[in-house]
Amino acid sequence: MQVVYFYFKEKEPVDVPTVTALLVVVPTLSILLKNYLNLVSPVYGVTSCMLSFFAFYALLLSCMMAYRLSPLHPLSRYPGPLLCKISKLWIIYLAYRGKLHLYYKSLHDAYGPIVRIGPNDLSINEKKLIPFILGTRGMPKGPIWDARRNRQLGKDREYHAVIDVRDLKVHAQLRRRWNEAFSSDPLKDYQETLTKRTQELCEHLEGQCKNAASGVAVVDLAKWISFFAFDFMGDMAFGGGFELMRDQDAQGIWEGMEKGLTQSIIQHALWVAVMFQSIPFFSSGMRKFARFAMDQAKRRTETPVKTKDLFYHLYESRGDPTNPSSYEAQLSEAVTDSTLIIIAGSDTSASVMSSVMSLLLRHPHAHRRLAEELEEAFPAIDCDDRRIIEVEKLQNLHYLNAVINEAMRLLPPVPSSIQRGPPKGSGGKVLGDDIFIPEGTGVIVPPYCLHRDPRYFSPYPDSFIPDRWLAPNASPASTSSAPDLKGEVGPQPIFKTDREAFIPFSYGPANCAGKPLALLEVRYVIAHLVTRFDFFQSSQESEGSKVGEGHGTQWEDEMEDRFVFTKGPLRVGVRAKPPTSQSG
Ligand code: HEM
């Protein structure tokens, strides 16, 4: 037993043959040998075998727990709940419930900025430590990526995606071309596709309104926005391939991917990932999505498209255009990265856009103010009498950006899974002056907790107040006659808005590679939705909502932390606004 225990403690094996050998073969052999020597009767033999097995596992688990709770454990000085210290199973259970973000927040409220959330895991909710964890002086990606990598595309994958590579040098190499693919010139190339798909989204919604007797259709806006985001990312990654807005996920691709997210519990323990991977039932959704991605990437490598998409900027612009076989050579990378584009780029952006719309619905004053800002900024109309939304102007619209920031503050699309850990063989890492992180530790920096911490965002850290982004930090000048929380005109509280603690796109060299595209997309789509439609709260959404509150609503209650936030439906009444010239 001691040998098995020390082997587990030192090597942490996860492959099925070794684990089976240690947990089944070793005890079986030793028990058989013991019973052979003591054989009295078959009944005695079976009972004795069972008792011996029980004793073996009980002793093994007791040794593990005793060590994890003892002062000898390298994380013993950090506070945290007992259940977290002894096993990962508690966190895995909470991850299964989808409410880890709320749990981590409650832990930080109770224990302070550094909490032990697993036998070898810490959660750090401290702004001044962010550069030491995520910055250029920080650490590489943490252990969750060993588990997530296994799950994404199957064991046969040879090539690491930029998001899951744990070696800093390899990451920097891979990241270079992503940074180039999202620089200002390529970004202009993506605008044509964005315009086309946004127009399509608006036309689908207008179609729904036309079909409704009163002109007001009740739609699940979150679903339409998700379908839009997938279609758009499909265009970026594969030059087309998804037509979810048109076909409503007839092939079950979106559903497969969403199921994959639900299985995100696997990221909390590599052994769980390995176990799930070997059970086809659990991994079928993600496999279906991976197969689809593979087919699309193959098609895309064989048929270069006219529009310069993300695939072009990541691959084709680097290969020899006269030699199609150079694309072939990159197929493995292309499949991996294309899948990553869909996974990283669709649910995240869709989550922000849907949250913005949900929050605007509950805050009519903010909605009105945003509509006014947009109408003033875009007076020109096109031949269809629609406002022309100029992309270049969007980033300078203060209220629009304040609304988007505030939605990402309250509901960051990646609420808790930003993780780093000391590199293998480094012996550990010291954060700041005296916080030692031993090798083998995973450290998360949870945006959901930072963003709602009153040390960084106050007053009312849980409330939706776009104005907090407009006022200079805690300056008396921010006391103005701007509308207050209830939409009344009155003196504004003095806000503390600490941008260094605002990390919806993470921070440092492995922050979100797609941030420029994501912001462009979110601003553009929100501007269209707000200027072209009137939205009404459905009775479901209004339940439980309070003026000025950003939480406790159905929308928020249904969000689940599955690495990215997954969303419930957003049922709204929608009416197409009359063409601009008729609206007076
Ligand atoms: C509002 C939308 C989005 C948000 C809030 C968001 C947020 C994030 C976050 C928090 C990470 C994890 C970084 C870390 O571990 O430190 C990430 C990584 C990444 N995201 Fe995004 N993302 C968004 C949209 C996109 C889009 C549209 C793309 C385009 C394909 C994209 C591509 C990536 C990539 C490639 C990575 C991996 C970067 C690396 O490891 O170097 N994201 N994103």
Image (spheres, helix red, strand yellow):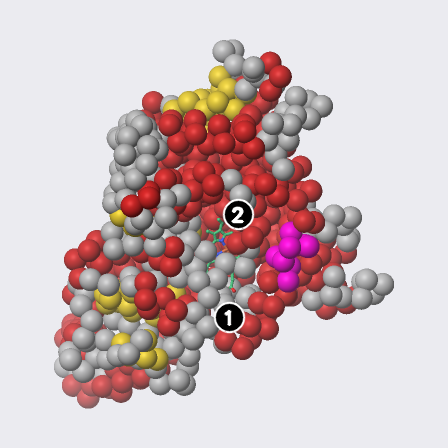
The quadrant where residue 198 appears: top right
Q: Is residue 238 visible?
A: no
Question: Which quadrant: the C terminus?
Answer: top right
Q: Is residue 113 left or right of residue 275?
A: left
The answer to whether mark 2 is within 8 Å of ligand 1 is yes
Query: Mark 1 is on which residue type?
Result: Val
Residue 496 higher or lower than 442, as above or below: above
Q: Does any atom of ligand 1 lie closer than 8 Å to the CB of label 1?
A: yes
Q: Mark 2: which amino acid?
A: Leu
Residue identified by numbered label 1: 165
Give me the residue at 51% from left, 70% from top.
165
Secondary element type, mark 1: loop
Q: Which callout, 1 or 2, points at the residue further toward the start of the chain?
A: 1
* Residue that numbered label 2 is attached to: 519
Expressed as whole percent of the image width and height from the top left, the position of residue 185 reads 68, 55
Extreme residue toward the front, this view: 477
Query: Residue 66 placed where, x, y %?
Result: 15, 77
Stretch in magenta: 180-187
- Residue 151 image offset from top left, x and y in percent: 47, 62
Instruction: Identify which residue is drawn at 76% across, 66% down.
Output: 319
Residue 569, given in percent of the width and then of the height, sits at 41, 34
| Circle 2 crowding by C-alpha within 10 Å: few under 14, some 14–19, many from 20 | some
> On the picture, is 427 further left or further right than 57?
right
Q: CA distance from mark 1 to mark 2?
A: 25 Å
- Quadrant of the image occupied by residue 480: top left
Q: Is residue 94 magenta?
A: no
Q: Going 35% across and 80% down the picture, which residue do you hit?
A: 429
